[in-house]
Amino acid sequence: MSDTSVDISGETTAASGFGEVADYFALLKPRVMSLVVFTALVGLVVAPGSMHPIMAFTSLLCIAIGAGASGALNMWYESDIDAKMSRTAGRPIPSGRISRQEALAFAMPLAIGSVLVLGTLVNWVAAALLAFTILFYVLVYTVWLKRITPQNIVIGGAAGALPPVVGWAAATGTVSLESLVLFAIIFIWTPPHFWALALYRSGDYARAGIPMMPVVAGEKSTKKQMLIYAALLAPIGVLPWMMGFAGIIYGVLSGILGLVFLGFAWRVFVSDTGKSTTVAARRLFTCSLFYLFLIFAILLGEQVFGLETMTVGF
Amino acid sequence: MAEKQQDNEVEIEEEFFRRRRARSYAIAAILLGLVVLFYVVTIVKLGPGILDRPF
């Protein structure tokens, strides 16, 4: 039951106070949040030294809430373009279940609270990084870049790549080269992942006036750039093993996964315009999700089972 | 007709209060969780030293 009306700008306006608890939860972008928590967990576990489980839980909770608050602030700011895209039209604000003011009033205390609690209970380096991540996602990506440049998700991808660095900082109180390698993996992975989505949703993005790469530069240029990023990602994905903070199992599997990812990007590159591109882009999008999950899951698995020091020949 | 509209308004009002109550319970649960979290983290950070303090 959503008592909604349409104002003169054509935007749907929600009646105040009708949001369900589930609608507020949806504002936190739970699927994105789960990936953020997972990569932060890996950063936290791979970091040297040990951390009390309660402190680790507290860190992940704050990172999850900070990420959720960023998602809610993103939905608050982008409700006009969300309403124009089929993928996002059902979100709580454009569908009229929650008003923009309610979303803002919900997100701000969560954003500030997550940073303050992380700083007070864990450490202020991690808290500062979390604050930077939230501000970068909301101000740099959402407010500034998303509507003006096709490089929006390339630069904005830094926000999505920071959670393992925050996790590492929560465990050690520092930022190290190893945590920056984890950052680099997600940062380089982001463009082919989102451009694959944009290739088969380009109509949606064009309607909403978002200058995604396929809309601005065309399919051919986007496919070429995706292939370049996939080619860069393959060796960067192996770096944790080369730098010695992952074992041989990770080294071998990350190499194979990088080549598989590159293969899917190649299929997109050589696909003909139209249905063939749509199919290849959908496959690459699915592959990219598996790639990132598996890369971090293997890193985590090696740490959990004590295999990170295993070398060739044992 | 007027009766039907009145019934509808009552229904909407009931739904409004049901949703507000659900949100209030959720906020209460979150605040309680925060209290427990601060308590447990305090115990973890102070460890055995929690009993070792000047009176």
Image (cartoon, coloured by chain):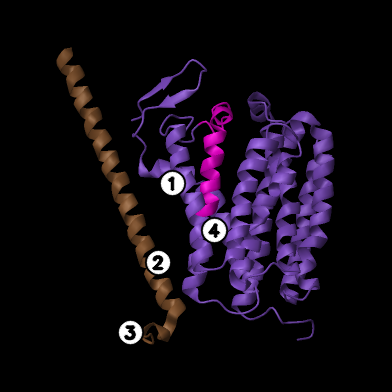
Chain colours: A purple, B brown
Q: Residues within 10 Å of mark 2 (few under 14, many from 20)?
A: some
Residue A10 visible in the snapshot: yes
Quarter of the rendering containing residue A162? bottom right
Identify the main secondary structure in magenta: helix
Instruction: Chain letter for mark 4, please.
Output: A
x and y percent of residue A196 in the render? 71, 41
| Residue to which mark 4 is pinned | A63
Residue A280 appears left or right of A25: right
Question: Distance from label 4 to label 3 (Cα)?
Answer: 38 Å
Assign the N terminus of chain B to one quadrant of the image.
top left
In this rendering, the label closer to the viewer, 2 or 3: 3
Q: Is residue A85 magenta?
A: yes
Q: Nearer the viewer, residue A98 or A254?
A: A98
Identified by mark 2, the residue type is Leu
In the rendered structure, which segment of residues is drawn in magenta?
A65-89
**In the rendered structure, are the residues bearing label 1 and label 3 in contact, judged by CB atoms less than 8 Å apart?**
no
